[in-house]
Image (tube, coloured by chain):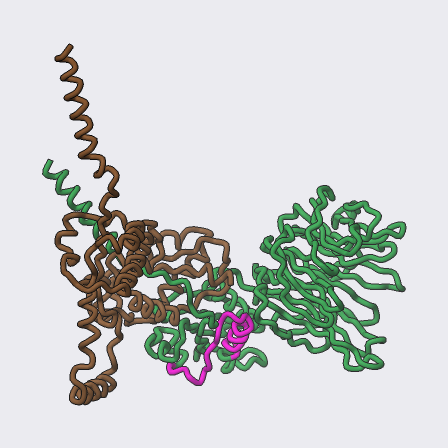
Chain colours: A brown, B green
Amino acid sequence: MVKSLFYSVSFHALMILITFLTLPFMLREPIDLPPIVSVELIQISDKTSIPFAPKARKIIEETKKKEDDRVVSEQAPPAAKAKEKPDRIPLPNDKKEKKEIVKKKQNPEEIKPQIRQSSEFEKKELVDTNQIAALIDKAKEVEAVQKIDDNKITQSTQKNSFASGLTLSEEDALRAQIFGCWSVPLGLPYDQNLLVRIKLQLKKDGTIMKSEILDHERMNRPGQKFYKVLAESALRAVRLCQPLKVPPTGYDKWKNLQLNFNPTEMLKG
Amino acid sequence: MKKIISILLFCLLFTSKLFALIEVDITRGNLDPLPIAVSPLHVDVKSEDYKDLKIKELGSDISKIIENNFRRTGLFNPLKKEAFVQKPDIAHLKPRFEDWRLIKAQALITGKLLIKNDKLKVEFRLWDLAAAQEMTALAFTTTPSNWRRVAHIISDKIYERLTGEEGYFDTRIIYVAESGPKNQRVKKLAIMDQDGSNTKYLTLGNELVLTPRFNPTNQMVTYMSYFRNMPRVYLLDIETGTQEIVGNFPGMTFAPRFSPDGKKIIMSFAKDGNSDIYTMDLESRLVERITEHSSIDTSPSFSPDGKFIAFNSDRSGLQQIYVMRSDGTNVKRITFGKGIYGTPVWSPRGDLIAFTKMHKGRFYIGVMRTDGTGERLLTENYYQEAPSWSPNGRVLVFYRETKAGEKGAGFSAKLWSIDITGYNERKLATKTDASDPSWSSLLSK
């Protein structure tokens, strides 16, 4: 009897102790760790700026020199600022909890402990709400980009920019050039599938080494006169456009290029 | 095992390459007409004289006809000959493509002609200048007096090669030539090439003629004429000039048209005071009634497969367009728009119906799909009517009248053509005023 009472009391005491010890932890909200937002700062002009004509470049260089003489490095500060941006991100604390929750919603999968260790959050800096807001915006952008990627939108702009291809402006330059060369045969019916795919092999200067219509066997099939006409017009456009406006660098990326000619939209309009 | 692995590796390599290929979508181009150079045909030095034909100029005359044909389509832009660098004889053998590309031409037509033993031999080549290769080459032999037709046939072949559609240049248009003041119009039946040349008058003008229509299979024409105030339907063979009366029909008879096989004519006439649609077999002369309705049914037109008939009727109140089976069953109204619809004509391609619409005192020529959807009004004016299709179903010819002033002054009627896209509206050159055009099928078919 005494023995069993002792067991009972001691077990109950143990239970109370455990409850006492763990209850505060259970009541406490889990620590919300801030998501890691990796922000890569690229100067857009590095990749997309079109080289100036030699004359213009001379003038620009001259004016730059003059400016450099007068002002002590006017251009440097913005770049430096940009680099500092990540450093200013504050340590997470209770005051910032609200904002951090917002972040979490946007980008939950990025909370990875390993990355956190190497992150620059540890650096102690002043809390700047503007910087955080900017970061949130960036995070949104990153997320949007990822969504587009996930949806596998097949439009070439997305495909190219994020796969391996040309930058948007490079692609636009090429496209605009071919628009000008392509005389769309106006008599074509608009309700047929008339997509012509041409695969090109280019030289470094943008001239064409080899061109191939991918569905060329369709050209000689009976009843495909319109397709033949379109394919020929597309090929003509590419040849007339030589040399193509390709980027000065990254030859390996664009030495094989596929152009998809689709006049449906135009013919409908 | 090693083999399998190496194959797998190769496949992997290949797929990675495939994904790396950059694709660029080209969804726009320029809509300017295709610049084309038509070099004058080279006249062979061995050519003999033929009657009063100016042989030396024949080469450039033919090229001019081709050029004009192309310009009228609105799809091509023939370049000025002054810019041509190469002479016709050399160009025909092997053009210097760089020279032609320099003047921004994308296609080049060259040719050669020879008249020997009263035969005209013409050969031509079409070159793709960008690809530096020949696209097509053909030769014709005919009597020298046929040289204009040769030019049209060459135009047709090139048009077909460059657009994928059949051409419509080796064709003729029959129409009613009109002259005199409005209250005393003299109306004659006339025929010309589609470019306005070779006009011939087929009747004298002492009887009123109306609504000539081509047989879609050959060069026969049916038309109406009033003889002693009685409407008669005639058949006319253009090649031989022979005419025959198909029949006398009572009351108001309207717009006879051929069936697609050319064996029947379809028309409307009034029997017992009510207009209905009838067909007549040209061999047996048997008349068959197609519609039987108390309303006025007129302007019937067969679909190119002969299975359906489009016509207009006022059975719902205002005049609208209806489609039915060729035996008169399954009548369906297809137009529901505001205004009055009339003169439905089925396209030779079978995909569209052309019509005239009147709304708020203005006249429109339009096209729509055969179920009545996709209505497109192509042109609008004070008075215009009677669309007729080019044999490839791409162009419509119709006539347009201007408003007459006091005592009929300033009144005129002219033929016009327009693309089914609504672009490229052009006045056709006729010697006199003209109305009621009908476009023939290709002569060389």
Magenta span main SS: helix
Residue A200 in which image quadrant: bottom left
Toward the left, the furthest residue is B2
Q: Is residue B419 visible?
A: yes
Residue name at image x 85 percent, y 55 percent: B248
**Does the magenta run of residues contain B84?**
yes
Q: How many marks?
A: 0
The residue range painted magenta reads: B61-86
Residue B136 vs residue B347: left or right? left
Q: Left or right: B156 with respect to B311?
A: left
Residue A77 x, y percent position in the rendering:
19, 76
In the rendered image, residue B341, in percent from the top left (x then y), is placed at: 73, 59
Q: Quadrant of the C terminus of chain B?
A: bottom right
Residue B310: give x, y in percent of width and height: 70, 52
Q: Is residue B27 left or right of residue B260?
A: left
Q: Which residue: 83% across, 68% down?
A: B207
Instruction: Please determine whether, in this image, residue B284 is positioned above or below residue B245.
Output: above
In this rendered view, identify the residue nearer to me: B47 or B368. B368
Residue A54 percent location from the top left of the image? 22, 84
User: Residue at 28% across / 57% down in the picture?
Assistant: A139
Between A35 and B327, the residue placed more toward the observer is A35
In this view of the protein, which residue sits in the foreground, B42 or A38?
Answer: A38
Q: Quadrant of the N terminus of chain B?
A: top left
